[in-house]
Every structure is written in structure tokens, then in C-alpha cells.
Amino acid sequence: MPDMVQIDAIYEGKLRCKATHAESGTTLLTDAPKDNEGKGESFSPTDLIATAVGTCMLTTMGIAAKKHELDFSGATVRVRKEMTVTPPRRIAKLTIEIIGPPTISEPNRLLLEKAAIGCPVSKSLHPDVQTGIVFHWGKP
């Protein structure tokens, strides 16, 4: 049976929702962005997609690093999200920049980059969403 995760959310009014991860009880708030009638006081739902892509890439790289006994600590990701300017409103482009530790050797860098590209969240995006990924090893 496939893994199943339950998330419950309540609309609190004023374009804000509170979501709860059923297993852990962790909560997060979403707010509509300023450019779509919101206050932009928290992540928007599309911000969460951008966040999910970036953290998924780091996580899959971390899993691969663990399997190969590599220290991947301190790796970072920056995701820039661009929305369409014409309807329908959706994510047009995600630009992803991953900075990995400089101590990772060239063959292992390729292995980790392949893991990032194969992350399940990025594979779940609609094909119309443009993605660009840049890897830096050490400081950009």
C-alpha cells in the first residue's frame, strides 16, 4: 500500500489557512500573496510548492550522501518563484540554486546532482512549469 499522509486545513478568514500535519501535529499558516488580494504575511500555497521543490532536492541529495557516507551538512538551496502574468494564474518558473559543501569530490557531486534532479516533488510539477537548476560547490 502506498504511503499516505494526512494534512487537515481550516480557512481562518481573511485569505488565511492553518494546516496541520496529522502525524506530527505540526502546523503552518498560509496567506494569499500581496499580488493576489492577500497580506503576504506567511507562505502562499504556491510558495509552499517552491519550498517543497527546494527542500525535496536537498533531502534527496542528503539521502544519497548518507548512503555514500558523505558529509552534506550545511548545503543550502534558494528557490525563486515566478508567477504567470496572464491568466490562468499559476507558477511559470522556478529557478533553483543549490550550494553544496566544497569537500564533496567531483564524482560524488555528479551523484548528488542526479539525486536532486530526480526529486519526487519536481517530478510532480506540471510540465509547463519551467525549472532551472544551478549547482555550486562551495560559495557561489
Image (cartoon, grey):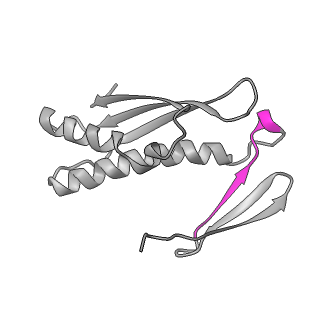
Residue 96 quadrant:
top left
- Write the residue at 78% across / 33% down: 35
In what quadrant of the picture does the C terminus appear? top left
Q: Is residue 55 left or right of residue 74?
A: right
Q: Nearer the viewer, residue 85 or 42?
A: 85
Count of marks placed on residues: 0
Image coordinates for residue 91, horizontal then vertical, percent:
62, 34
- Write the residue at 72% across / 23% down: 85
- Write the residue at 73% across / 46% down: 41
Image coordinates for residue 86, horizontal then vertical, percent:
74, 24
Q: Is residue 51 visible?
A: yes
Q: Is residue 57 left or right of residue 83?
A: left
In what quadrant of the picture does the N terminus appear? bottom left
- Write the residue at 46% across / 48% down: 121
Q: Is residue 10 left or right of residue 73?
A: right
Q: Is residue 43 visible?
A: no
Residue 107 quadrant:
top left
Q: Nearer the viewer, residue 132 or 137?
A: 132
Q: Residue 66: within the magenta?
A: no
Magenta-highlighted residues: 26-36
Image coordinates for residue 16, horizontal then vertical, percent:
78, 55
